[in-house]
Amino acid sequence: MTDLLFDYIRQTRRIFIELVEGLSPEAINAIPDGLRNNIGWNFGHIVVSTPGLCYRRTQVQSDRQIPFVESYGKGSKPEHWIGASEITALKAQAMNTIDVIEQDYKNGVFASITPFATSTYGLEMDTIEKVITVTLAHDNLHLGYAMAIRRVLEGNKK
């Protein structure tokens, strides 16, 4: 079952990467009226949230370094222009972190975690399988936000 979850996370991220690759830097950074973030922030947020949930929140590696977490972590907001080099780094990190988490999962790194609940879903997670499931739901939530922002930017043409 967990292999399937990792497959779906990767596929969601591929779709998100395709969305980002099909947009101009202006569209990636645009914040439509009435909204608080942009497509680039939503993408960066999924990239940093997954290792945050799997390593930090579970207390498996509470001091794990996560690139870009200050810009895209929980409670952040778009505060700088997201350039091409940052998007490229985020795209690589989006896929690489899943590979690392899957390998650590197979190696038993997450055999014992500290249970926690997220403010988004409010359900306690006491196994890494539950955390990985929430990661999939969270990624899809932010992909949906990004797709909606794109539609607003395109004038609801699609």
Image: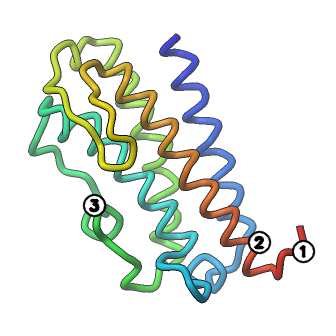
Work out whether mark 3 precedes mark 2 in sequence or the reverse, and give the earlier one. Answer: 3
* Residue at 77% in and 71% down: 151
Work out whether mark 1 precedes mark 2 in sequence or the reverse, and give the earlier one. Answer: 2
Give 121 or 52, whichever is nearer the viewer.
121
Q: Are marks 1 and 2 in contact (CB under 8 Å)?
A: yes
Q: Are marks 1 and 3 in contact (CB under 8 Å)?
A: no
Give 84 or 13, whichever is nearer the viewer.
13
* Residue at 46% in and 85% down: 81
How many C-alpha atoms fall within 10 Å of the one at disc 1: few (<14), some, or many (≥20)? few
Q: Amino acid at mark 3?
A: Val
Real-space Cα separation, disc 1 to disc 2, in angstroms: 7 Å
Give 84 or 101, whichever is nearer the viewer.
101
18 over 154 or under it: above or below: above
Tell me, for residue 157, which label it has, or none: 1
* Residue at 48% in and 15% down: 2
Q: Position of residue 24 (x, y in %)?
A: 69, 79
Q: Position of residue 7 (x, y in %)?
A: 59, 25
For label 2, the residue is 151
* Residue at 31% in and 42% down: 51
Give 67 or 71, whichever is nearer the viewer.
71
Query: Is 70 situated left or right of 80 in this image?
Result: left
For label 3, the residue is 69
Q: Amino acid at mark 2?
A: Arg
Element at label 1: loop
Q: Amino acid at mark 1?
A: Lys
Q: Are marks 3 and 2 in contact (CB under 8 Å)?
A: no
Q: How are the residues colored?
A: rainbow
User: How many numbered callouts?
Assistant: 3
